Image (cartoon, grey):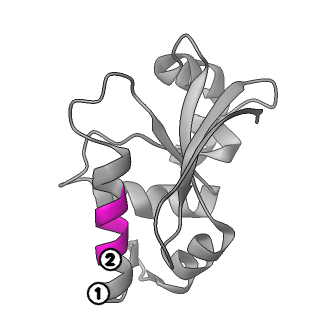
Amino acid sequence: MLTDYVRIALKSQIYHQYCGADGLQVWLLTPESEGLLRDGLRQTQTETFFALSNDISQMLVQQLHIAFPLRAPEQAVLLVAQDLRSPLCTLLREEFYHVPVLSVAEISNAAKVRVMGRFDLEDDLEPMDNEHAA
């Protein structure tokens, strides 16, 4: 929890760390995908983690491989709701260590954001090619 507050306080620095010439390139989750992930959240006294079905886990891994290749020419980030950021970071730590996971709260309203697409854990990846201001 303290980490989240610190990250929000450092939002300008975090933005500039991942920002390219065209702004921040982000992948989002569909609202349905966020719901599926929230439904899979489990909490103990010491941690919060995901208990996802095999189908959802496989779809997530498949879409992450497509959206975040190891040798991508430009770095994109996965932009998620604040309550999903920390558990997703933990989940992705081993296989997708190169994928930065940021929360919407860590991005300024004036930040230039380019949405690359949306993860749809009920369907295929939805690529986009338009710019939005976050």
Q: Is residue 61 magenta?
A: yes
Kindly tell me whether residue 51 is visible in this rendering. Answer: no
Give the main secondary structure of the magenta stretch: helix
Q: Secondary structure at mark 2?
A: helix
Kindly tell me whether residue 78 is visible in this rendering. Answer: yes
Image quarter hosting the C terminus: top right
Would you place residue 57 above or below residue 108 in this image?
below
Question: Residue 13 placed where, x, y %?
Answer: 57, 18
Region rendered in magenta: 58-63
Quadrant position of residue 26: top right
Q: Judge from the rendering whether residue 59 lies leftward or rightward of residue 31; answer left or right.
A: left
The amino acid on which the numbered mark 1 sits, given as a three-letter code, is: Asn
Q: Secondary structure at mark 1?
A: helix
Would you place residue 1 above or below residue 131 in this image?
below
Say which residue label 2 marks: 57
Furthest residue in direction bottom, as rendered: 53
Question: Badge 2, how many Cα within 10 Å: few under 14, some, many 20+?
Answer: some
Say which residue label 1 marks: 54
Question: Residue 18 placed where, x, y %?
Answer: 48, 23
The amino acid on which the numbered mark 2 sits, given as a three-letter code, is: Ser
Q: Nearer the viewer, residue 124 or 68?
A: 124
Asked whether disc 2 touches disc 1, contact meaning CB atoms under 8 Å apart, the reply is yes
